[in-house]
Amino acid sequence: MNRAVDYLEANITEKLDIEKVAKIALSSPFHFQRMYHMITGVTIAEYMRRRRLTLAAQDILSGRKIINVAYRYGYETPEAFTKAFRKMHGISPSAARELGANLKDEFNYIIGVEEIKETLPKGYVSATIPAATWAVFESVGALPEALMDIIRRVYSEWFPATGYQHDLCTPGLEVYPEGDKHSPDYRCEYWVPVKK
């Protein structure tokens, strides 16, 4: 799978040849696309579209002509490129060049504690995590390696074997009890929201 993704990245401006990519992953096109979607939560075509538009934004910010960028990333017309760019980034390619333009969605990693009764300190916020169906995995070992191994196995082994999908509308949780996080016996949990 990693070799297949490396190939996609190296050929990001080329037309997607799903049969060649699947062959690199030692899989049929059908199973490769299914496995990729189960691991990442997006289709291979959506991944390619997003990566191309991200790279296109970088090219535009570096001063390349919009029409050249559009053709480089496979758009037949500047209008089609502008429509796709606006849908992903929220602004047009020409507006992206303006000083202070903001393109990327945010990825939030929030550190929290269970509800406290006292007044929250300044700068802190209270949030309620919505009800969801969770798969809970225990990690045993020194951090971060042990937890990263569990997360990798969840996406590469557990999801493909169970038929569940990652519920991307709900946050995942990492639960760290007190203790020596570098100990080979340290136990923590990875909670992933799932749906059938």
Image (spheres, rainbow, N blue to C red):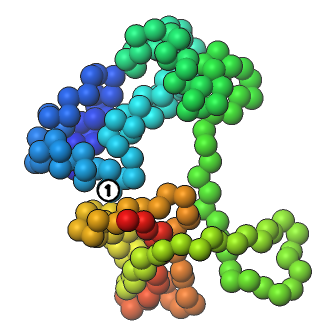
**Residue 195 location in percent, x, y?**
42, 66
User: Which residue lies at the image location 55% right of the left edge and 32% below the top edge?
Assistant: 88
Query: Height in image: 125 above or below 143?
Result: above
Query: Height in image: 167 above or below 80?
Result: below
Q: Residue furthest front?
A: 196
Question: Residue 157 lies in what quarter of the image?
Answer: bottom left
Horizontal side of 154 relative to 95 (left or right) equals left
Q: Quadrant of the C terminus?
A: bottom left
From where the camera sits, is residue 153 visible? no
Q: Amino acid at mark 1?
A: Met
**Residue 80 location in percent, x, y?**
49, 15
Query: Height in image: 183 above or below 132?
Result: below
- 181 or 173, which lies in front? 173
User: Which residue lies at the image location 39% right of the left edge and 47% below the top edge?
Assistant: 42
Label total for image: 1
**Residue 175 location in percent, x, y?**
54, 80
User: Which residue lies at the image location 24% right of the left edge and 45% below the top edge?
Assistant: 33
Under tag 1, what secondary structure? Answer: helix
Horizontal side of 31 relative to 108 (left or right) equals left
Q: Read off the residue under disc 1.
A: 38
From where the camera sits, is residue 187 visible? yes
User: Which residue lies at the image location 59% right of the left edge and 52% below the top edge?
Assistant: 107
- 79 or 125, which lies in front? 79
10 Å crowding of disc 1: few (<14), some (14-19), many (20+) = many
